[in-house]
Image (cartoon, helix red, strand yellow):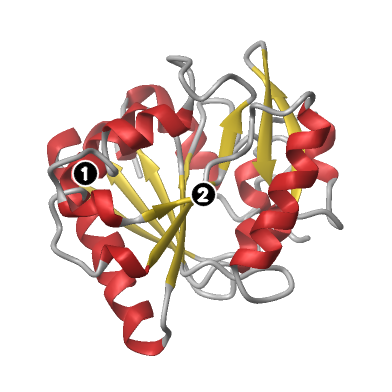
């Protein structure tokens, strides 16, 4: 894949509160659009503290959530009750009781199996059955951007970045094994959104937007959908752009 084949649309907002609101509004609009055209909407979401704030806002959006299927783009291979679990975070935010978002149909990564390999196989089968297309085409792919340039669990210099035939792979980063959708699935989405917050992400964001930046140093460059990638950033992350 050429690192310059993706195009990016950068939208900058003032702070983390506005970033959460902008992200929630974009995802809600894309869900509405998908449901106008199809019976169900399929969205893949990121873990992390930045999107968690957006999910709390999204939880209050009055959408036909019972027609929305939600998966995680990646998950740490920990029990679903572990504080590091993205599924636990999602259940505490988007899926929290009392808000309309609780009606969404969530399909967690099965991390309770005997090994990461077993979780990869099971989740790949599930994603293939859940979402139409080859590779499966999600309506929304919401991604984060690590300060090292990783996205989902595709970390620089790891075998996960080279996987092109599987839908799901094992990622390794920051001391934990992880289960991740692969670059072909991330790239197949109808709309990819990167959510970027804080000065620590400034260099990674500059590298993402640089047409000459190699994907081996910044794996987020592996995400190359047909439609322009929407990058939502706050002023701290976007300073100097």
Q: Quadrant of residue 239?
A: top left
Image position of 65 (left or right of 207): left
Image position of 196 (left or right of 16): right
Q: In terms of sequence position, does the residue under pointer 2 or pointer 1 come before the other?
A: 1
Disc 1: CA contacts within 10 A as few (<14), some (14-19) or many (>=20): many
Instruction: Give the residue at x 54% y 46%.
Output: 208
Residue 203, labelled with which disc?
none
Which element carries disc 1, helix, strand or loop? helix
Which element carries disc 2, helix, strand or loop? loop
* Above or below for 185 versus 49: below
Marks 2 and 1 in Cβ contact (< 8 Å): no
Image position of 49 (left or right of 221): left
* Above or below for 234 versus 88: below
The residue tagged 1 is 19
Look at discs 2 and 1 and give the one toward the viewer. Answer: 2
* Above or below for 213 versus 80: below
Q: Estimate the x, y position of residue 14 in percent, counting from the top left.
A: 14, 41
Residue 107, labelled with which disc?
2
**Closer to the camera in the image, 56 or 238:** 56
Instruction: Give the residue at x 70% y 64%.
Output: 128
Picture quarter with the C terminus: top left
Q: Estimate the x, y position of residue 145 in percent, counting from the top left.
A: 49, 37
Instruction: Give the residue at x 34% y 80%.
Output: 35
Q: Quadrant of residue 109?
A: top right
Residue 149 visible within the image: no
Instruction: Give the residue at x 68% y 52%.
Output: 222
């Amino acid at each position: 894949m050429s690192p310059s084949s993706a195009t990016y649309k950068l939208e900058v907002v003032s702070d983390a509160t506005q970033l959460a609101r902008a992200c929630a509004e974009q995802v809600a609009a894309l869900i509405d659009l998908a449901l106008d055209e199809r019976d169900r909407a399929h969205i893949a979401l990121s873990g992390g503290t930045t999107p968690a704030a957006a999910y709390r806002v999204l939880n209050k959006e009055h959408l036909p959530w019972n027609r929305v299927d939600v998966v995680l783009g990646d998950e740490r291979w920990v029990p679903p009750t572990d504080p590091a679990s993205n599924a636990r975070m999602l259940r505490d935010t988007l899926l929290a009781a009392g808000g309309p978002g609780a009606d969404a149909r969530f399909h967690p990564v099965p991390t309770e199996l005997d090994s990461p390999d077993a979780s990869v196989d099971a989740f790949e089968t599930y994603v293939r059955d859940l979402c139409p297309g080859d590779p499966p085409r999600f309506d929304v792919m919401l991604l984060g951007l690590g300060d090292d340039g990783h996205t989902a669990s595709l970390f620089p210099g790891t075998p996960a970045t080279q996987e092109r035939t599987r839908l799901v792979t094992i990622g390794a980063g920051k001391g934990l094994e992880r289960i991740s959708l692969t670059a072909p699935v991330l790239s197949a989405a109808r709309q990819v959104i990167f959510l970027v917050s804080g000065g620590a992400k400034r260099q990674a964001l500059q590298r993402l937007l640089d047409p000459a930046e190699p994907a081996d140093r910044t794996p987020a460059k592996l995400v190359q959908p047909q439609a322009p990638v929407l990058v939502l950033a706050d002023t701290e992350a976007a300073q100097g752009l």
